[in-house]
Image (cartoon, rainbow, N blue to C red):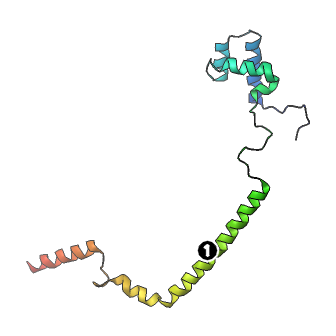
């Protein structure tokens, strides 16, 4: 973590700062600064105002070095993880019960899958087999 008062800045931010300082000193126009920065000409005055107000920090994102606004507190995070693990254990227990019950009636499920028409219980298969029977009768 940098010392207080020391500004850590990327090369891209340094380049943006140089362009903004040229525009502030009127060495280039705001429109030229906008083209160099790849932003609209309407945004350049906002950045220049921030440059006057905040100094070199104007080009750095406001949340750099801070935690996210969406970050959960450590207590909430731990509680969520614990409850998630407990829920997962309960689900695994429930699934093991279901699997135990399924093993008992496994043979019955194979017969029920065949259906009343034997192995070809899918409606399309039945329909096509009926056509074949009709064609063979002709």
Relative depth, front residue between 11 and 104:
104
Q: Residue at x 74, y 9 (%)?
A: 27
Q: Is residue 41 left or right of residue 69?
A: left
Q: Residue at x 41, y 86 (%)?
A: 110
Q: Residue at x 59, y 78 (%)?
A: 94
Q: Find residue 85 and report its horizontal and vertical position in percent.
A: 69, 69
Task: Name the image quarter holding the N terminus.
Answer: top right
Judging from the image, what secondary structure is the residue with disc 1 in? helix
Q: Find residue 62 and report its horizontal and vertical position in percent.
A: 75, 33
Relative depth, front residue between 49 and 38:
49
Q: Find residue 20 and report its horizontal and vertical position in percent.
A: 74, 18
Q: Find residue 29 and report its horizontal and vertical position in percent.
A: 68, 10
Image quadrant assignment for residue 113: bottom left
Q: Is residue 112 left or right of residue 61?
A: left
**Which residue in the structure is indicated by mark 1?**
91
Task: Name the image quarter holding the C terminus.
Answer: bottom left
């Amino acid at each position: 973590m940098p010392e207080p008062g020391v500004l850590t800045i990327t090369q891209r931010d340094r380049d943006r700062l140089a362009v903004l300082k040229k525009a502030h000193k009127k060495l280039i126009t705001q429109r030229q600064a906008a083209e160099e920065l790849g932003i609209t000409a309407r945004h350049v005055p906002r950045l220049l105002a921030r440059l006057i107000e905040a100094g070199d920090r104007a080009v750095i994102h406001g949340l750099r070095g801070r935690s996210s606004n969406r970050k959960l507190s450590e207590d909430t995070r731990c509680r969520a993880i614990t409850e998630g693990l407990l829920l997962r254990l309960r689900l695994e227990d429930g699934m093991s019960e279901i699997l135990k019950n399924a093993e008992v009636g496994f043979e019955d499920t194979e017969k029920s899958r065949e259906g009343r028409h034997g192995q070809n219980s899918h409606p399309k298969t039945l329909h096509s087999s009926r056509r074949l029977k009709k064609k063979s009768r002709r």
